[in-house]
Amino acid sequence: DIKNHYLTCGFRVKSMKTKQLIAIFLLATIHFSCSKEDPSIPNEVGADIIGNWALTDYNFNGSQRTLTDIDVSNITFDATAWDINVAVIFNESPNDYSAIGGHNLDVNVVDENGDEYYFPSHREINDVGTWSKSNNFLGLTIDDELRQAAISELTETTLKYIISSSESFNDENNHLITINRTDYYTFTRSGSN
């Protein structure tokens, strides 16, 4: 099982609710959307987004609340990417978007008792879709799923945006799981535009 896998890999895993850890680990390796909260950001952004960009920094943080028939539990998590090699292209006419590459990810989970857990992973990215932009809002549609981002900085050399998401679902035991997450992306313009 996954608990023994992490013990044999030398990572500390206690007898915390394994399902919560598995849910966070799996969600940490995928990217989901449904932005419902808009962070505080400037009203206007300056430069043109069209062109080639390299992802230079990526991290996220959030929380998960699990409601069962007799218990409520809360955990927090954060992650930082490293060894990032992701190329992103924003084309126009049509507004095509692609992100290709990969990065390593260090995911840290803290349960309500203060116990900490560490999950390393590697993520390959092969996203193709479309984009739209209105002032400081960016919409990325990938696999028919809209990811709404708030652009916090857009200059000739730097693009930063934030995706805030909230998701609630019932797991296989009909426990209500609510996950709130904020992803932070930083890009540097690269190549020919």
Image (cartoon, helix red, strand yellow):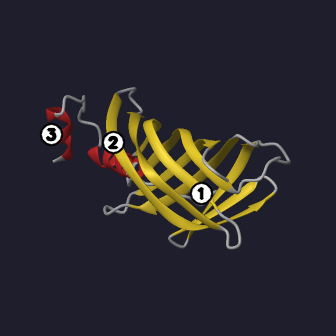
Q: Is residue 145 left or right of residue 28?
A: right
Question: Which label belongs to residue 4?
Answer: 3
- Residue 123 position (above or below residue 13): below
Q: Image quadrant of residue 148? A: bottom right
Q: Identity of the amino acid at label 2?
A: Ser
Q: Nearer the viewer, residue 174 or 43?
A: 43
Question: Which label belongs to residue 178?
Answer: none
- Secondary structure found at label 1: strand
Q: Is residue 3 left or right of residue 52?
A: left
Q: So how many labels did they put on this image?
A: 3
| Label whose residue precedes the other's in the sequence (1 or 2) | 1
Eye-nearest disc, 1 or 2: 1
Residue that numbered label 2 is attached to: 121
Residue 112 percent coordinates (x, y): 42, 33
Q: Identity of the amino acid at label 1?
A: Ile
| Label whose residue precedes the other's in the sequence (1 or 3) | 3
Quote the CA–CA distance across marks 1 and 2.
25 Å
Quote the CA–CA distance across marks 1 and 3.
41 Å
Q: Residues within 10 Å of mark 3 (few under 14, many from 20)?
A: few
| Residue for point 44% across, 60% down | 126
Q: Residues within 10 Å of mark 1 (few under 14, many from 20)?
A: many
- Secondary structure found at label 2: strand
Residue 64 percent coordinates (x, y): 47, 45
Q: Nearer the viewer, residue 173 or 149?
A: 149
Eye-nearest disc, 1 or 3: 1
Does residue 67 show up? no
Contact between marks 2 and 3 (CB within 8 A): the answer is no
Q: Residues within 10 Å of mark 2 (few under 14, many from 20)?
A: some
| Residue for point 63% across, 57% down | 35
Quote the CA–CA distance across marks 2 and 3.
17 Å
Q: Is residue 188 left or right of residue 64?
A: right
Residue that numbered label 1 is attached to: 89
